[in-house]
Image (cartoon, grey):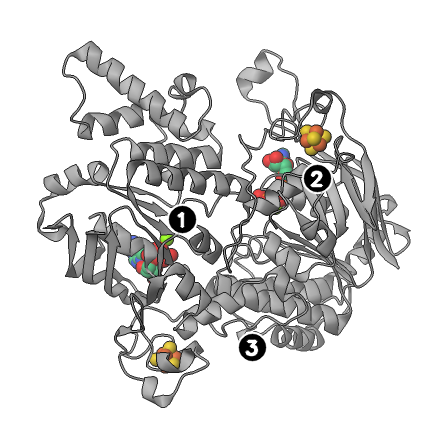
Amino acid sequence: MTLLQVDGLSKHYEARRSLAQRLVGTPRSVVRAVNDVSLTVAKGEVLGLIGESGCGKSTLGRAILRLHEPTSGRVTFDGTDVTALAAPDLKAMRRRMQIIFQDPYASLNPRRTVAEIVGLPLALHGIASGEEARAITARVLERVGLRASQLDRYPHQFSGGQRQRIGIARALVSNPDFIVCDEPVSALDVSIQAQIIALLLELKREFGLTYLFISHDISVIGYLADRVAVMYLGEIVETGPVAEVLDNPRHPYTQSLLSAVPEVGPRRDKARVRLQGDLPSPLKPPKGCKFHTRCPLAIPACAERPPESRGVGPGHVAACHRLDGNLSLLEPVR
Amino acid sequence: MTVLLEVSNLHTEFHARAGLVRAVDGVSLKVSRGECLGVVGESGSGKSVTFSSVMGLVRSPGQVTQGAIFFDGRNLRDLSREEMRAIRGRDIAMTMQDALTALNPALTVGEQLAEVLEAHDETLPTGRTARRTAIRDRSVEMLGLVGIPSPEARLRQYPHEFSGGMRQRIMIAIALACRPKLLIADEPTTALDVTIQAQVLELISDIRARLGMAVVLITHDLGVVAEHCDRVMVMYAGQVVEEGPTDQVIGAPCHPYTRGLLASIPRPALRGQPLTPIMGQVPDLVGLPPQCRFHSRCPLAQPQCLVEVPMRDAGPGRRSRCLRLEEMA
Ligand SMILES: Nc1ncnc2c1ncn2[C@@H]1O[C@H](COP(=O)(O)OP(=O)(O)OP(=O)(O)O)[C@@H](O)[C@H]1O
Ligand SMILES: Nc1ncnc2c1ncn2[C@@H]1O[C@H](COP(=O)(O)OP(=O)(O)O)[C@@H](O)[C@H]1O
Ligand code: SF4
Ligand code: SF4
Ligand SMILES: [Mg+2]
Ligand SMILES: [Mg+2]
């Protein structure tokens, strides 16, 4: 059953102009942080979203929850058009859709105690107050591996991993169905990362949660996601079942991303694709296929027309002009 | 291979408000000519302080209190500030974890390259115009070497005008300008995306092969070590806990911490299996008792481990700081 459906979602930001630019009348430039993105997440599923820094992952996650108002497009959650909801209904819906933020340091208010931070959604949604709220908060805190005796401490008294547990408790306390996990482990050390990933998977099983799991770490996505969506400069270039995409990537960007991941374990003769050049500025994205400035397989048509998404296998979709020839950057050494 | 850098029993301390922090506590290591040594460990384990100590860059409230640092036959701790400054940049160069703060924001990239070349390059001609042209040519060459497109124009730009990956490459260009014998790269790619990370690491390997330079690669990514380093040393809470040839350490770790780290890495092959994370967290470095520092998190811990544990031989070229290493095979 589809729990979340995103259709043609875009989020454009207006870039700020300098005084000089305003004086000479330089037109406002627009960052197309998320551009015409469609995806679905089934109930109980983990959809992994991967892509490089700045490609629009967090923006997409926030636009889905309307924490950032989308510029256009539709988000349907459990049959309800979230994008059409007025404020009170949106608030009620937020109880069911939560987010865990990327930065465990910046995302917790330093002047609030853990009890206040974690208990806030309870008050906000009128679920509980006073002693009852405190009891619920304490229970959730213990469930994520902290102690009830830490309720009255402030965020700075906790390590990065513990802060991320506080963020998880805050997302969990209103008993949601769906959580956007925005790089919940990227800022943490390897041993702490593993603790948090194990916790998130336990919670998912226990409470029947559905995750949109954002990460730039393909190993993490390969370990925990059911399906994966690959993002480049605001657009989804490939989606499919995780095993399918990792073993048989069809988009040249996915292929180069996979070949760039350094792996522990026996050194195998992995085909190397080294991209040239940096990620283009999202202020001036390339025309046609946005990957053509770095793509080793680009042909003249790629600079002219953007490619359409096409099915390339069961549930597996990619957007590239050169899917027909079964070309691959990854040599058959694998 | 001859030894280029040999550090023995290094101690570096910080006088912090909470008390004395023994950030580096008895670290010994060797780097041979042309070799690549990987240094891994969680944040705060002492990786950066160890190599800032080697560079003579530890500043108050920090202090190197004990140990010897032999480089190319000389004990760096006996050198004057002037002599040390001459060695930095010319013989040993270090790139910092954070390129934006390590580069001078007020100077163009060209000015910063020129500064290093002026200070260290003895092959430059003495005539003013010839010298200026030579510096320019070398600078353009260096930026080209690290893959910056249109280097002439880029020389006139300031650090903030470059992307994160380009800034790391510029720092590497500055570090390599005088063709050092040893490059210390402190987390050169931690802030970068995988595709850019791959470019930067490939670049370092490439230049290492071409110039016969030795490299110390500080990272917390065991995958990076597996693909780029001949040997690896693992640090925990200010000490080296294991060292040896990379494939052996990763294939058959002989310290419970290394083993725990490897088991912590999520990867597609482990799908459906639970991860076995290391429980707990890194101990506070203030006032640590003299006992195995991994004791509180170690699944093999025994009461006998509550003593100071020395580095012990664990096979040819391998050492481990564990009393039970024989049982780990
Ligand atoms: N409030 C904002 N105003 C203007 N531009 C923004 C804003 N927030 C994000 N952007 C731009 O939108 C693009 C996407 O940013 P976003 O934070 O979604 O990336 P991301 O994929 O989450 O990156 P990371 O992996 O670094 O977290 C970037 O170019 C960013 O600079
Ligand atoms: N300037 C400083 N003042 C006080 N303590 C410091 C300072 N620099 C580093 N430390 C401490 O030294 C220890 C090791 O730090 P560092 O070498 O930077 O770790 P790593 O590079 O392995 O992440 C940490 O406990 C850190 O807090
Ligand atoms: S459409 Fe062209 S440029 Fe884009 S990924 Fe495919 S081959 Fe490369
Ligand atoms: S000495 Fe004991 S506590 Fe320390 S790592 Fe070895 S087994 Fe674990
Ligand atoms: Mg983000
Ligand atoms: Mg460091």
The residue under label 1 is which amino acid type? Glu
Q: Judge by depth and name the residue closer to the eye, B62 or B313.
A: B313
Classify mark 2: residues with Cα within 10 Å, few (<14), some (14-19) or many (20+): many
Sequence-first disc among 2 and 3: 3
Query: Dividing the picture into quarters, in which one does residue A274 lie?
Result: top right
Disc 1 C-beta below 8 A from ligand 6: yes
- How many angstroms separate mark 3 from mark 1 (CA)? 34 Å
**The label number, if any, that marks residue A147 in the structure image:** 3
**The label number, if any, that marks residue A251 in the structure image:** 2
Give the x, y percent position of residue A154: 51, 65
CB under 8 Å between callouts 2 and 3? no
Compared across the picture, whether A264 is left or right of A309 comes to: left
- How many angstroms separate mark 2 from mark 3 (CA)? 46 Å
The residue marked by circle 3 belongs to what chain? A
The residue under label 2 is which amino acid type? His
CB under 8 Å between callouts 2 and 1? no
